[in-house]
Image (cartoon, rainbow, N blue to C red):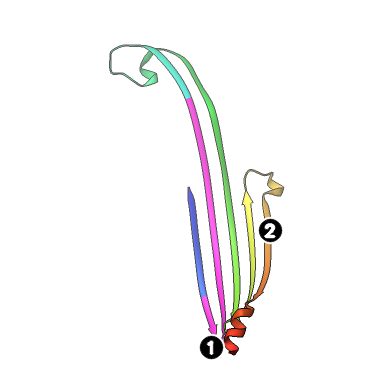
């Protein structure tokens, strides 16, 4: 099962300033079961369920696996349109049941900035 949800909001200040906000939530859950069973001596043809056999001689759980992940993400992007200047800030908190209880969550962040010099020169021409 996978659940994803996002929210976007754009704020324009004056004509040249734009701030974009984004929030994301993602949840994943996985479960896998594999059971093997054998039976024989069925009373009549057409019976196919293991419990319909006269001799049930093997049943075992071969594989079982389950895990969950959850993730939260927030992003803020600032764009100064006229000069081609961009700033962004990203924060993500991620958790997984595959790790020990005291180590299940991690925090990740990033900061970035760019300046499109070509855009600045073309606007001055």
Quarter of the image holding residue 16? bottom right
User: Which residue is pictured at 68% across the width and 65% down the height?
Assistant: 110
Q: Do the residues bearing badges 1 and 2 touch, measured as CB atoms within 8 Å?
A: no
Camera-side residue: 124 or 59? Answer: 124
* Local crowd size for mark 2, using a 10 Å CA cut-off: few (<14), some (14–19), many (≥20): few
- Residue depth check, mark 1 versus mark 2: number of the one nearer the observer: 1
* Local crowd size for mark 1, using a 10 Å CA cut-off: few (<14), some (14–19), many (≥20): few
Magenta stretch: includes residue 2 = no
**Residue highlighted by disc 2:** 107
- 68 relative to 94, above or below: above
Q: Position of residue 71 (x, y in %)?
A: 59, 56
**Which secondary structure lies at badge 1?**
loop
In this rendering, does residue 31 appear at all?
yes
Main structural element of the magenta stretch: helix, strand or loop?
Answer: strand
Q: Is residue 80 left or right of residue 56?
A: right
Assign the C terminus to one quadrant of the image.
bottom right
User: Which residue is pictured at 64% across the width and 79% down the height?
Assistant: 117
Quarter of the image holding residue 18? bottom right
**Residue highlighted by disc 1:** 15
Camera-side residue: 51 or 87? Answer: 87
Quarter of the image holding residue 38? top left
Magenta span covers which residues? 10-35
Q: Position of residue 120 (x, y in %)?
A: 61, 84
- 2 relative to 25, above or below: above
User: Which residue is pictured at 60% across the width and 66% down the height?
Assistant: 74
Q: CA distance from mark 1 to mark 2?
A: 35 Å
Q: Is residue 109 left or right of residue 81?
A: right
Magenta stretch: includes residue 21 = yes
**Which secondary structure lies at badge 2?**
strand
């Amino acid at each position: 099962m996978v659940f994803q949800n996002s929210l976007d909001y754009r704020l324009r200040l004056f004509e040249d300033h734009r701030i974009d906000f984004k929030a994301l939530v993602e949840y994943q859950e996985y479960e896998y079961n594999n059971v093997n069973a054998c039976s024989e001596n069925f009373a009549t043809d057409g019976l196919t369920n293991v419990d319909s056999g006269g001799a049930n001689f093997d049943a075992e759980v071969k594989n079982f696996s389950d895990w969950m992940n959850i993730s939260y993400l927030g992003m803020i992007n600032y764009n100064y349109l006229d000069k081609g200047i961009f700033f962004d800030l990203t924060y993500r908190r991620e958790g997984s049941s595959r790790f020990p209880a005291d180590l299940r969550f991690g925090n990740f962040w990033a900061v970035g900035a760019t300046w499109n010099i070509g855009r600045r020169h073309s606007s001055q021409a």
